[in-house]
Image (spheres, rainbow, N blue to C red):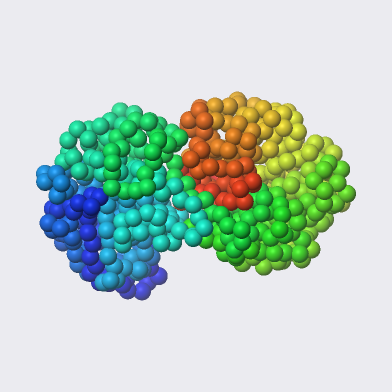
Amino acid sequence: MTGSGSTPPATPAFTGEMESGTAPVSGAAITVYAAGNAGVGTGATNLLGSQSVTTDSSGKFSVPAFQCPSSTAQVYLVGRGGATSSSGSENTALAMTAALGDCGSLSNSTTVVMNEVTTAAATWALAQFIGPDEAIGASATNGTGLRNAFLTVGNLVDNSKGAAPGPTLPASAKLETAKLNTLADVLWSCDQAGQGTACQALFSAASEGSVTPTDTLEAALNIVRNPGTNMAGVFALLSQGPYQPALTAAPHDWTLSSTFGNCASGCGGLNLPGSLAIDSKGNVWVANYFGGAASEFSSTGAPASAGGYAATGLSESFGIAVDAQDSVWITNENGSSTEGSTGSGSVTHLSSAGEDISGPGYTGGGLYFPIAVAATSGGNIWVADYANSAATLLTSDGSAVSGASGYAPSALPFTTAVAADANGNGWFAYQGGVAMVTPAGAVTAFSCCAVPAGIALDQSGNVWVADYDASDLVKLSSAGAVMGQAAGGGVNTPVGIAVDGSGNLWSANYRANTLSEINGATLAALSPAAGYGLDAQLYGPFGEGIDASGNLWVTNAYGNTLTELIGVAAPVKTPVLGLPAQP
């Protein structure tokens, strides 16, 4: 976010136009901001100082030259007030924004069309970084998450045209463009009204508790941040707006998704994708059961390799983890998927660039049908051995710590998932319960569940288990005491689970093709009764992860795709090593 000591670059003047649909907005005040780095929603800087910029009768404006704080400072525009040519009257409730990204990318050839589409796109992508006064900022340690969120805007909207989708959206990707346009059309109904009854209806529909929005940008933010609330009420405000295509019926929720990998070849090598993991740059890594390759996607969904990264030992891969060096660890069944398989299995180690480090794979430490893996903050790697009903511990070079048979062979019936805690212990889910295994091999087991398929720890060290057969999420204390179950919010055959930066739990509901959000403290459902993501057309959602921008990523096992729910969760520091943390 800041420079390295060199003189910050001066940015040439650039031009733009503020429009409501096809109608110019005249007399609006335009401000250029650099996003802050002193905390979420704080520290934004007006880069024009005392200079004022106002749109003319055609909605056009010219931004004078200004000084960039740094070439990578994230810049955005805000336009407030003004009158549309259709209403002819001042609308103080009108507020729009356009997220431009790196300050150093701006030039005198830059042109911006700021309208309701740029506003909706920026609101979704930057929802986790917008403060109560609509300022944008991140913590000093999350410049990567903020910049990636601005990059995501480029997938959603072309700021030079004010139209969706954006120029960086991969060609094969599927964006919910109609939903984005629908929200833009709803905002348009107020912007055109000159602050009449249409604005009052919008602000009422977008109210959050006792807080009622006072402008269209705040209304958009409330809708995006409460995606399971008042879907029909907001949709009812839609008139025949200018942005098409638009929805013809109310959405199941107001989450916005992009789905990647929708092609036969050249889209990253997704082939029955299983678990996923996210590195420190926001890249998403995926284990594939078929194809002998691991997939990597950028923070905006671009595949790093057309066919994925092949490695000698990759075969029938389910589990994946990223360590502190951004290198990748993947489990390989290497044999029949039936119980009692004679294949021993292995673990593959790839560099952050996808280079094969482990050759045929690591096979020591009791590995037998390994199905899940977790990296610790100290550099060790825990592996869940399904067929051996045991735990394996490897060092960062693949050497076995856990002996020839692994820890607790046959004592952890059909281990299915593993997570590491702050002390480097491994927490394993197995049929009927969970167990904590220390690096020295001491095992403490707890009964809790029927057939758990996923496990995660929260910021307090509590343990969450996705109980597939019971279709609920079980919360245990760090001492193993059951603290309750969560079954609402659409939880149904959960597999992948993840904890966000606020301590809320997200589950991937395999058979229901949905996602659920649960309040981590109260166990109350935050997602609607049917869950989130029905509009995204998930297909066998399996692996799950949350990045430092607040995007929720999920693999679709049967769709051979990767779906991103944009800005829906509290950001998490990645890779997750031990307990999840805010970035």
The N terminus lies in which quarter of the figure?
A: bottom left
- Where's residue 113, x and y in %? 27, 58
Q: Is residue 3 visible?
A: yes
The picture quadrant where one finds residue 16 is bottom left
Question: Which residue is depicted at the point 82% across and 55% down?
Answer: 364
Q: Relative to 355, say whether 400 is above or below.
A: above
Determine the residue positioned at 28% across, 38% down.
239
Please report the residue visible at 22 percent of the width from the left and 35 percent of the height from the top.
198
Between residue 565 and residue 467, name the one nearer to us: 565
Name the spot of residue 236 as percent of width and height, x first: 32, 32
**Residue drawn 63% across and 63% down?**
307
Q: Is residue 226 visible?
A: no
Going by the image, does 517 lie left or right of 234? right
Q: Is residue 202 above or below residue 576?
A: above
Picture layout, residue 528 above or below residue 60: above
Q: How many marks?
A: 0
Where, by quadrant of the figure, is residue 474 drawn? top right
Name above or below for residue 247 compared with residue 448: below
